[in-house]
Image (cartoon, helix red, strand yellow):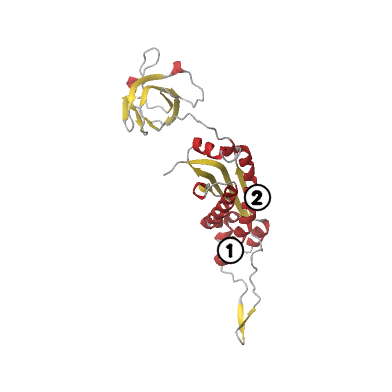
Amino acid sequence: MEKTTVLANLRLTMRFNQATLKWLQRYPDSWVSKEEGSVFLAEFGGTWERLFLESANHEAQAYFTKLGVPAERLPFVLVGVRFRGSWELVAYLVITGTVSSTFAFFKGISELPKIAEGLSAVKAGIQKHLQPLLDLAARDQLIQTLGLNEEPRRMRSGGIPVPVQTEQPLPPPTVVESDLMLDSRPLASLTPAVKVHKVHLSVGVSREGFTLENLGDDPLRNVRLGLFRTKTERHQWSYVDSYTAGLNLLSGGQTTSKRLGEFRDQQGNLLDMSDGEAAYVDCWVEDDHGIYLFRFFLEME
């Protein structure tokens, strides 16, 4: 998969408006009315997501096209996570390429803060384009799900359809309200060169031993390991309180294990957790680039 750089963060929130919530009181036993409609909105979330992506990509790509970005380099929107409650979607406006190459590319077009500022118009365009689509789709889905019939018709002689009054009130003309947040600070904050250190570690702790797995491709060198054991959860530590051990090299993809008896404090005491008492165990792994902290809780045996 090609690398991408985030230009902006987006968050769409969608909920039934007050008129629709009042109308739904006619159907108190329907699953559509549960949790103020959030169950319904989640059930058909794929529809709202599709409409959002269509609107967001259309507006964003139209903006960057006007700036002179070629079609093959146009940014696009990726979905991140979804939330229940009022239906909520987190997404990202991204462009293919690394941070450094993206910075150089946009610097050749205009000043980054100016480009980022222009995304406010993109946000307004998305909202203007998206809201009526969400309303229409949500209203149609309500009518279909509840088995209502908009404009039932009978045929007059000659094949002319004539509207017939229905006894089932239809949803309001607009049924949902939506909020869109667009944060363009990632684009404005791009820099020409970034120092990068990647670390992918898996750490395991038991009452008998410790395991460390290098999930990355690059080797870890001159690794220092430390373990703290406390009866209560702590957020501050001192190195003198830790039991430490060392490791010269851990190649990419390798896993190593150590007995807890190999960890010693500054007085030479061995770490022992064989008493079976509940314990908070905090572990730090340090190499030549930084310190990485992992936290565990061992239940009473």
Residue 107, position as x, y percentages in the image: 57, 37
Examine the image and state in which quarter residue 286 appears.
Answer: top left
Q: Which is nearer the N-term, disc 2 or disc 1?
A: 2
Examine the image and state in which quarter residue 115 appears.
Answer: top right
Q: Which disc, if any, is residue 124?
A: 2
Q: Is residue 195 left or right of residue 36?
A: left
Q: Which element is circle 1 on?
A: helix
Q: Which residue is mark 1?
A: 142
Residue 273, position as x, y percentages in the image: 37, 24
Q: Up-down: is 219 above or below 82?
A: above
Residue 3, position as x, y percentages in the image: 45, 41
Labels 2 and 1 touching (C-beta < 8 A): no
Query: Residue at point 65% right, 50% down?
Result: 124
Q: Which element is circle 2 on?
A: helix
Query: Residue at point 64% right, 44% down?
Result: 118
Q: Residues within 10 Å of mark 1 (few under 14, many from 20)?
A: some
Q: Quadrant of the C terminus?
A: top left
Q: Nearer the viewer, mark 2 or mark 1?
A: 2
Type of amino acid at the residue the image marks with label 1? Leu
Type of amino acid at the residue the image marks with label 2? Ala
Q: Up-down: is 52 above or below 214?
A: below
Give the total of numbered labels: 2
In the image, 170 versus 12, the foreground residue is: 12
Residue 209, position as x, y percentages in the image: 33, 27
**What separation in Å lies between label 2 and label 1 (alpha carbons)?**
27 Å
* Residue extending furthest toward the top: 267
Does the rendering let one see residue 247?
yes
Q: Quadrant of the N terminus?
A: top left
In the image, 12 versus 193, the foreground residue is: 193
Q: Up-down: is 137 above or below 276?
A: below
